[in-house]
Image (cartoon, helix red, strand yellow):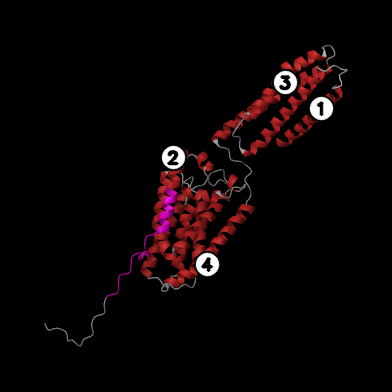
Amino acid sequence: MTDQPSSAEPEPEPEPAIPDDLRLKLPVPTVSIVLIALNLAAFAITAARGSGWMVPDPDKLVAMGGNLPALTLHGEPWRLVTAMFLHAGFIHVAMNMLCLWGGGQSAEFMFGRRSFLAIYLSAGLVGGIASAARGTMIVSVGASGAVFGVFGAILGYLIAHRTQLEPTVRAKRMKSLVSFVGINLLVGISVAGVDLSAHIGGFAAGFLIAVVAERGLDLQDRARSMARRFPRVLVGLALSLAVVGVGLVALPKPALAYITGAEGKQVAEFERQIKLFATNEVELLARQDELTKNTVKSANEIARIIDEELLPRWRAHEKNFAGITDLPAVMLPRQRAAVAYLHARVDYLEAVSAGLKLDPNSPEVPAARTALAAREQAVVDALAALKKAFE
């Protein structure tokens, strides 16, 4: 065989292979690593403090900032942020962090670090308010809403740049995303305890922000695309905050207040004291009325009975009510009203006893009568407040 003539055109060099995913020459995904580290650190701290390494303790998760509608929608919106970094056990945090590592590497390169972080937070907040909109008495925790937002953003990126991406790469990633979303939707529907509202809310937020932010950007001019993308993503973050704000104001506030296990015991004790007092009050007032109408016993004898028989029992009831701690906030007005009423009763009987011990001709009698009238009115006012508190 002879060599080909030197005048023949050289064969073109083969084009470089197209990567099998969109990470390309992705540098270290700094934001993803930091987010994973924060989530793992938060899990370790909360688990060590009693939230549970494998089986979660709902009461502890609520105390540490879990998203509970009864609290989030009643003046504690910060729970939408803290709940993003709490998890219900090791398996929960492990699955979320694996998903974040898988999607975060691609998304962080696609959008840039700043835009990626803004999308993550936006999706997490929207997912949180979507979860609170359920109005349940179940605490919601986890980075799922934010992680779903990351995958939603990747889908938006693939759709927005469908004409600029190599078809094989785009088809592969689309298939992977559809599988991820489909499996998680199936799990959310079939498995109890999965917060599907947070998943859908976060995914929708990430998708919409990405579709709008990527509109008209040229992937070949990466620097210019980055410069144009970030302000758009910030607008998306602002709109997400607006959605959260509207939700906090407009969503119906759950009528029931959350009660932890410890609070439940105190509520039971409070109700026991109410029943005990309701029974004893009838007896005490009847005895007091009897003494008031008595014309046989001397004033000093009546004062002695008040001091030794009636006052100790009224004081015991006041002490018992005041000694109940850790009641849920919704019960505190009732406790304060009960203590105030009992204290008014004690003050009134002390004034009665003091007046009975005075010599009828003493110059202190007019002042004592005035004080007694004031304390009697205080009892009336305290009783009205007590009834109102229990309405």
Q: Residue at x 24, y 80 (%)?
A: 11
Q: Which mark is residue 48?
A: 2
Q: Magenta span covers which residues? A: 14-40
Q: Is residue 249 left or right of residue 155?
A: right
Closest to the observer: 159 or 250?
Answer: 250
Nearest to N terminus: mark 2 or mark 4: 2
For the C terminus, the quadrant is: top right
Q: Which mark is residue 371?
A: 1
Q: Is residue 382 above or below residue 193?
A: above
Closest to the observer: 123 or 316?
Answer: 316
Q: Which mark is residue 311?
A: 3
Q: Secondary structure at mark 4?
A: helix
* Residues marked 1 and 2 touching at CB (< 8 Å): no
Real-space CA distance between mark 1 and mark 4, rounded to the nearest whole angstrom: 71 Å
Nearest to N terminus: mark 1 or mark 2: 2
| Image spot of residue 280 (x, y percent) | 70, 22
What type is the residue that disc 3 sits on? Leu
What type is the residue that disc 4 sits on? Arg
Real-space CA distance between mark 3 and mark 1, rounded to the nearest whole angstrom: 18 Å
Nearest to N terminus: mark 1 or mark 4: 4
Q: Residue at x 79, y 20 (%)?
A: 354
Q: Is residue 361 left or right of residue 142?
A: right
Query: What residue is disc 4 on?
Result: 232
Q: Secondary structure at mark 1?
A: helix
* Residues marked 1 and 4 touching at CB (< 8 Å): no
